[in-house]
Image: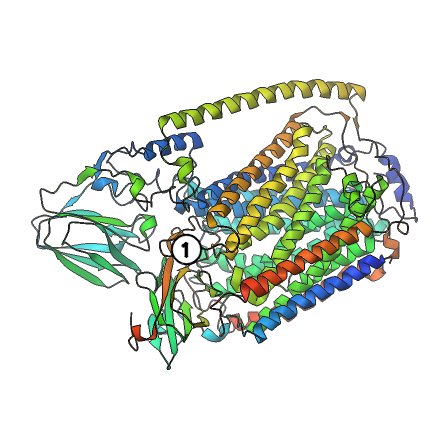
């Protein structure tokens, strides 16, 4: 993951990723945990490592719209498996340019992820097709924004204001973010995957290989054993398939001499559990929860 | 083989003929063609089970947050759809077809008629499976231009590729033809045996299939009339409420279609494995008749929280659902008592001490028994689901997957694995290999499922939603009633790993057996002893399948005519929505 | 037909369990007055444009009586309107009726930790009346799979002191 270049984040690898092999992926995760910083456009904002995953309509280029008074960014354009894209996703403008955000489909907003102090603050309210929001960008810097309902589809954008503002910034270590894939499972994941060093992954790899080797050895041994056992068994019956003999009963009981007392005990225990759970779920859990639906 | 369940005192000529022809005893040698059919069905079912296990593990680790490197959260739903579709349409259908082919052949003691029909339904089931599953898995592979991320419930207006719907329809129709095979076999037998009671296993198969014919019409209409034309663009829009109601018309009885094979095994094979005999043949018939009558007019209990359906219809569905508890509670008694009979015959005694006398080291027995035990627990959570207003508490929470992993996920799946240990040797003529692994496997499943399922139930009470890749939110927190959410996630993940290992052990044993040499003495004996109280004491009316089917139809009409009329009165396609991609 | 005495008693107990469970549910409906979501919310002829129907108003909170409010919520891929970008604000000690529908696919509307929970089906309006007694904050999640970003669909309800709500809120 940390080896992702700043180039396009191809759709095929990120969003539609096929089942990767566990070992490879855990090594990658280990690398991620160390927080290696690398130079990527917009600090990796459009890649798989950032919140929401990769942005499929971002091809690694920033559209140059400097020297223009007013430009339009389409909100809810086609992309990211539906109408979940900003078009263009990344754009460079001069200070003083008016940007018109034009809603082409429903249920989108513009939440500012980060930008220069005193600059544009995004547009948080969710709006539908036909809505427009415009802002004249005066403060130089890089503005990163996303659509709240569709962030996980990769609906993200960026505006670079000023011709000299660099778009390539180091990737921040993901630890502080808390939203990248796989590290926020109710606070439980940390001890298992966080801060893994190459030593830990090497140990894990070694363990996997050695357990696998032992298992394979056992399996081969067992295979030899059954071959011998099977040959003996087949010889015993001259190759015929023979059923096991009927199991002998210690005694024969007919319908009238069998009293299902043990069964009676078990079903009564079950009844008791049933009644207790019933009172708990209905009267304690359900009726005890407010508010409830009364009409 | 000589003492099959239908051996009554009225010994006929055919019975004697049969006894001579079955001198060798093993199913494979008595019915080589049927054994092959069952082997193919089980082969597909167990291969599907392997995939189900892989997808299940991926989901459990993903949604609990322990490992999210296999797929993205968007693709989680593809994996979830594959898991559900493989369980609902592939594993269960093939297992049922295989098991019922064995049961009908064995209990009628004759091969299935019309071999061409058999190969036709087997072909349809296989083709439908390949189509539906490849449409779903296409969502994970870039070069396959198909997607069907619509889960097993495929709620409109989420749209799948037409190939998915056509595949599902083929599986349904294939299962109908399999049923036709069983009915034709029965008709031939009846001509030779006028006046005899229907052999118990065949009785169970026929009532199950009558229930299935009645209920699967719902999904067939949904798919063929609405979804296929809609996904092809012939029909511009369909009504989401109507189509989901048709789905649930089928969606509850289908779980009995999955469960009744387990019931068949608990009634007819489990007592034998325990060293005893079934307590009562008549009660077993009563139970299956009740399932035929009550399984279908209950579907609205999946729609308690649907707007657009009047409360009265929901109440009727609840009443029917609650009375479905009766056959299950009856089964609990009869089956446990039959095991008890075995334990006493094996020398067991005492109020609870008899349990020790049971053959817990026989994986076929322990698997079936533990499956029954977990089903009893699932029975309770099912009662909660059925409790109309109580549904507010658990609807669409993790409680539901907790519930059905006890029912279809254990009662059916573990029973299927257990019976494979007993039946695969009889179908292949090969001695079970890795017996030690097989002995451990059901217990491992039991422990894994106990961990996973209890945590899922409690997570549901805490409000954790089901069907979600990441049940964690910026503004929403969940508080466990019993235990913490973190502890539940841990139990789910650990449980899923144990289940995966258990499944791997099972597949190792079965594949090992299959690859082994044929011949020698098997570990199993295929003879099924007569019940203690036989069919001769059962009222004849129990065997009147026409009557029961007619009553079942009437009950369905009573429960469904008015609400369905409400939905279609404003136009069959109204209020309609166009397809939307997930 | 031979049925053992214990089993006969067990059949009786089973029937009692069934009747008892139905009676419990009926008690919940009659005693605490828990009502089911039903067809009273009405239908929308063109599900894609709910606000054009008489059964649904523009999304927002409306005061309809002294302590009575109506909240119209649109659940859509992947947000609640209102609820996601701004919380649904209702006063404490009020009776609130939620009208929820969807212009796109089937969703869920679950107020976490409460018994407020419903399906949201295009073309149907789910109507739920709820009493909020104390100030507080509740999370809303979509609990029905609605597409590839389903797991991000959430919102909040803020129950605030009476004086913090200023009269009728129209379009929010």
Q: Residue at x 57, y 48 (%)?
A: B453
Q: Quadrant of residue B578?
A: bottom left
Residue B383 in sight in this render:
no
Callout 1: residue from which chain? Answer: B
Residue C14 in sight in this render:
yes
Residue A188: percent from left, percent from top: 43, 43
Residue designated by label 1: B477
Above/below status of B320 relative to A22 = below
Q: How many discs appear?
A: 1
Q: Of residues B549 and B224, which is closer to you in this image?
A: B549
Task: State the SS at label 1.
Answer: loop
Residue A79 shown left or right of residue B256 in the figure: left
Q: Quadrant of residue A180?
A: top left
Residue B193: percent from left, percent from top: 86, 50
Residue B83: percent from left, percent from top: 52, 45
Residue B510 shown left or right of residue A28 in the figure: right
Above/below status of B305 relative to A55 = below
Q: Residue at x 73, y 42 (%)?
A: B102
Crowd rating for badge 1 (residues with CA inside 10 Å; few <14, some 14–19, many 20+): some
Residue B476: percent from left, percent from top: 39, 56
Residue B171 shown left or right of residue C55 in the figure: right
Above/below status of B19 relative to B323 = above
Q: Of residues A291 and B252, which is closer to you in this image?
A: A291
Q: Quadrant of residue A96?
A: bottom left
Q: Residue at x 71, y 40 (%)?
A: B366
């Amino acid at each position: 993951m940390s080896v992702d270049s700043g180039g396009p984040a191809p759709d095929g690898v990120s969003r539609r990723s096929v089942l990767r092999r566990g070992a490879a992926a855990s090594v990658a995760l280990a690398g991620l945990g160390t927080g290696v910083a690398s130079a990527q456009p917009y600090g990796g904002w459009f890649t798989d490592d950032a919140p929401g995953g990769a942005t499929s309509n971002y091809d690694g280029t920033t559209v140059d719209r400097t020297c223009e008074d007013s430009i339009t960014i389409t909100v809810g354009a086609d992309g990211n498996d539906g109408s979940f894209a900003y078009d263009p996703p990344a754009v460079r403008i001069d200070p003083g340019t008016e940007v018109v955000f034009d809603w082409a489909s429903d249920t989108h907003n513009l939440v500012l992820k980060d930008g220069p102090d005193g600059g544009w603050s995004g547009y948080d309210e969710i709006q539908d097709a036909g809505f427009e929001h415009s802002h004249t960008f005066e403060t130089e810097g890089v503005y990163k924004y996303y659509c709240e309902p569709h962030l996980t589809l990769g609906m993200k954008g960026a505006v670079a204001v000023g011709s000299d503002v660099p778009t390539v910034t180091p990737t921040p270590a993901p630890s502080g973010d808390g939203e990248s894939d796989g590290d926020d499972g109710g606070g439980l994941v940390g001890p298992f995957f966080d801060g893994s060093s190459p030593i830990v992954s090497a140990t894990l790899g070694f363990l996997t290989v050695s357990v696998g080797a032992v298992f394979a050895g056992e399996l081969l041994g067992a295979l030899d054993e059954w071959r011998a056992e099977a040959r003996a068994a087949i010889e015993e019956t001259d190759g015929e398939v023979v059923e096991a003999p009927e199991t002998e009963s210690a005694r024969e009981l007919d319908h009238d001499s069998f009293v299902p007392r043990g069964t009676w005990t078990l079903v009564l225990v079950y009844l008791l559990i049933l009644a207790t759970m019933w009172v708990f779920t209905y009267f304690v859990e359900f009726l005890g929860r407010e508010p409830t639906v009364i009409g | 083989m000589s003492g099959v369940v239908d051996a009554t005192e009225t010994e006929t000529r055919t019975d004697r003929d049969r006894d001579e022809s079955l001198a060798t005893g093993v199913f494979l040698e008595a019915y080589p063609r049927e054994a092959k059919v069952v082997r193919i069905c089980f082969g597909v079912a167990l291969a599907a089970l392997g995939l189900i296990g892989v997808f299940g593990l991926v989901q459990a680790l993903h949604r609990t947050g322990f490992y999210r490197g296999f797929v993205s959260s968007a693709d989680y739903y593809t994996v979830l759809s594959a898991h559900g579709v493989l369980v609902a349409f592939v594993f269960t259908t093939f297992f049922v077809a295989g098991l019922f082919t064995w049961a009908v052949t064995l209990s009628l003691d004759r091969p299935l008629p019309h071999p061409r029909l058999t190969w036709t339904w087997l072909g349809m089931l296989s083709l439908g499976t390949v189509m539906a599953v490849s449409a779903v898995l296409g969502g994970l592979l870039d070069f396959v231009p198909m997607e069907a991320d619509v889960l097993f419930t495929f709620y409109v207006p989420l749209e799948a590729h037409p190939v998915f719907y056509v595949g599902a329809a083929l599986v349904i129709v294939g299962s109908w033809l399999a049923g036709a095979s069983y009915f034709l076999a029965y008709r031939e037998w009846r001509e030779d045996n006028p006046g005899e009671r229907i052999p118990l296993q065949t009785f169970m198969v026929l009532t199950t299939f009558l229930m299935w014919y009645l209920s699967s019409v719902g999904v067939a209409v949904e798919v063929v009339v609405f979804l296929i034309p809609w996904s092809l663009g012939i029909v511009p829009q369909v009504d989401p409420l109507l189509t989901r109601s048709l789905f649930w018309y089928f969606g509850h009885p289908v779980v009995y279609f999955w469960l009744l094979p387990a019931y068949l095994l608990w009634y007819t094979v489990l007592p034998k494995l325990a060293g005893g005999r079934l307590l009562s043949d008549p009660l077993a018939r009563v139970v299956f008749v009740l399932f035929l009558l009550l399984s279908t007019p209950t579907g609205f209990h999946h729609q308690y929280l649907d707007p657009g359906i009047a409360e009265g219809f929901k109440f009727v569905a609840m009443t029917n659902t609650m009375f479905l508890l009766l056959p299950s509670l009856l089964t609990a008694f009869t089956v446990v008592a039959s095991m008890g009979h075995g334990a006493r015959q094996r020398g067991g005694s005492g109020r609870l001490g008899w349990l020790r006398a049971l053959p817990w080291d026989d994986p076929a027995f322990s698997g079936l028994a533990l499956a029954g035990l977990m089903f009893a627990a699932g029975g309770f959570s099912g009662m909660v689901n059925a409790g109309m207003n109580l549904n507010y508490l658990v609807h669409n929470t993790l409680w539901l997957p907790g519930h059905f992993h006890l029912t279809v996920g254990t009662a059916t799946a573990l029973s299927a694995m257990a019976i494979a240990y007993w039946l695969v040797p009889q179908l292949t003529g090969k001695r079970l290999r890795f017996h030690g692994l097989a002995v451990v496997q059901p217990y491992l499943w039991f422990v894994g499922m106990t961990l996973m399922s209890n945590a899922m139930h409690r997570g549901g009470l805490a409000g954790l939603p089901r069907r979600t890749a990441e049940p964690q939110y910026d503004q929403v927190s969940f508080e466990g009633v019993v235990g913490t959410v973190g502890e539940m996630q841990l139990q789910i993940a650990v449980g899923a790993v144990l289940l995966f290992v258990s499944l791997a052990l099972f597949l190792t044993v079965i594949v090992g057996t299959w690859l082994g040499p044929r011949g020698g003495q098997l570990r199993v004996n295929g003879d099924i002893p007569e019940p203690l109280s036989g069919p001769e004491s059962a009222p004849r009316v129990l065997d009147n399948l026409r009557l029961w089917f007619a009553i079942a139809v009437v009950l369905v009409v009573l429960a469904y005519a008015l609400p369905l009329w409400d939905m279609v009165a404003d136009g069959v396609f109204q209020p309609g929505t166009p397809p939307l991609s997930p | 037909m031979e049925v053992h005495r214990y089993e006969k008693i067990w059949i009786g107990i089973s029937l009692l369990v069934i009747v008892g469970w139905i009676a419990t549910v009926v008690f919940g409906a009659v005693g605490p007055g828990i009502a089911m979501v039903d067809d009273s919310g009405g239908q929308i002829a063109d599900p894609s444009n709910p606000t054009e129907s008489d059964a649904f108003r523009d999304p927002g909170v409306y005061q309809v009586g002294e302590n009575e409010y109506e909240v119209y919520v649109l659940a859509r891929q992947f947000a609640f309107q209102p609820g996601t970008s701004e919380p649904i604000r209702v006063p404490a000690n009020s009776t609130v009726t939620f009208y929820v529908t969807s212009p796109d696919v089937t969703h869920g509307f679950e107020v976490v930790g409460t018994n407020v929970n419903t399906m949201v089906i295009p073309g149907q309006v789910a109507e739920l009346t709820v009493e909020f007694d104390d100030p507080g904050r509740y999370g809303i999640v979509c609990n029905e799979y609605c597409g590839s970003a389903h797991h991000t669909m959430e919102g909040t309800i803020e129950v605030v002191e009476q004086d913090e709500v200023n009269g009728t809120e129209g379009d929010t």
